[in-house]
Amino acid sequence: MPLPLLILVTRPVLGPIGGTDADADGDAGAHDRAGPGFVRADAAHPQVSVLDLGVTRGDGVFETVMVSAGHAPAIDAHLQRFGASAALLDLPEPDAAVWRAAFDALVDAAAKDFPDAPVLAVKLVLTRGIEGTDRPTGWLTARPAPDFRAVRERGVRVVTLDRGYRHDVAATSPWLLQGAKTLSYALNAAAVREAARRGADDVIFISSDGFVLEAPTASVLVREGDRILTPTPELGILPGTTQRRAFTFFAEQGLQTGTVRMRASELARADALWLVSSVRQAVPVIDLDGSPRSVDAELTAGLNRYLAT
Ligand code: PLP
């Protein structure tokens, strides 16, 4: 895999925390106000401190953005969610103009460095910074995206797994940070490993009281007749940028769309199921908890064509 291109964001947040303070050594340092607020760096060299709270505690937020033929159709939604995730963690507000300019610069550079990559995955990361400094750390990487064309056609086998929380934790226990895209994805990765142990490829999380939530790195879409449904973000799940774009596509196809609370038992009755996310896009669920599921290959292909542009 080629090394990603890297940009360090030297002015990642608005306000005095991201302001003019000099470093201990007197340099304007990582948060100087002059200049564009970001700088190219070499991903082959260490760039983040071992004392950074993003490293030691997973205390930070991120976004993964798909760039197709130099175009990022959901960048505004990603930047908006980046800010919302930061707010849920009581981080200072990301400077959207700086992140946007850094993103554009990185995409331009990647077009030159990866001329044969039709799709890029660009990751934006904001951490709470080095312990005791109150200075968030920010960076972006860009790398060629894996080729997901085969899995979009083949589909995935999915198991349902208990998320261990009730459906209403976002309201009752906001410190659980449900709905924020935090750096702490160890449990998401563990769930996918559990799926593999059970002979499946992916997971749909179910709340402890039986409601459909989301996949570890994707939103769930359900077709019931002429309706396409997705679990409501009120259930403490990530509001998916791809789900939102998919709903625009389905509405253009004359289908109804809606966000709902859905019981896990309703999945078995659904006419079709998909997992949707930015870079992998829409993959049909071909098997749920060991039961084969029917797939609308034409609709899936149409959805993926729409999502790619
Ligand atoms: N839910 C979770 C937990 C995710 O991690 C992701 C993406 O990584 C999604 C949903 C889908 O979000 P998006 O469509 O914006 O990629």
Image (cartoon, grey):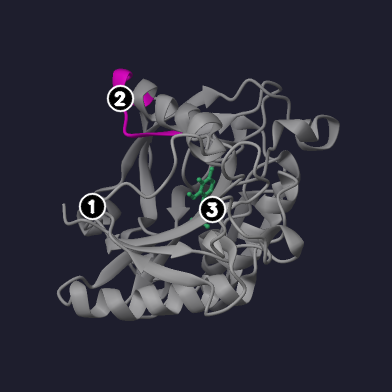
The reply to whether the residue tagged 1 has its Cβ within 8 angstroms of ligand 1 is no
Q: Quickly name the residue at label 3.
A: 25
Q: Which residues are magenta?
A: 195-203
As shown in the figure, which amino acid type bears the numbered disc 2? Ala
Q: Quickly name the residue at label 2.
A: 196
Judged left or right of residue 288, residue 117 is left
Residue at 44% of width from left, 41% of height from top?
Answer: 49
At label 2, counting other C-alpha atoms closer than 10 Å, the crowd grade (few under 14, some 14-19, many 20 or more) is some
Residue 73: percent from the left, percent from the top? 47, 76
The reply to whether the residue tagged 3 has its Cβ within 8 angstroms of ligand 1 is no
Asked if labels 1 and 3 touch by Cβ distance under 8 angstroms, the answer is: no
Asked if labels 2 and 3 touch by Cβ distance under 8 angstroms, the answer is: no
- Disc 3 and disc 1: Cα gap in Å? 25 Å
In this view, 39 is above or below 175? below
Numbered mark located on residue 87 in the image: none
- Disc 3 and disc 2: Cα gap in Å? 50 Å
Numbered mark located on residue 44 in the image: 1
Looking at the rendered structure, the secondary structure element under dot 2 is: helix
Q: Nearer the viewer, residue 251 or 199?
A: 199
Judged left or right of residue 19, residue 302 is left
Asked whether residue 247 is drawn in magenta, I would say: no
At label 3, counting other C-alpha atoms closer than 10 Å, the crowd grade (few under 14, some 14-19, many 20 or more) is few
As shown in the figure, which amino acid type bears the numbered disc 3? Asp
Residue 86: percent from the left, percent from the top? 67, 52
Q: Nearer the viewer, residue 233 or 188?
A: 188
| Total count of labels | 3
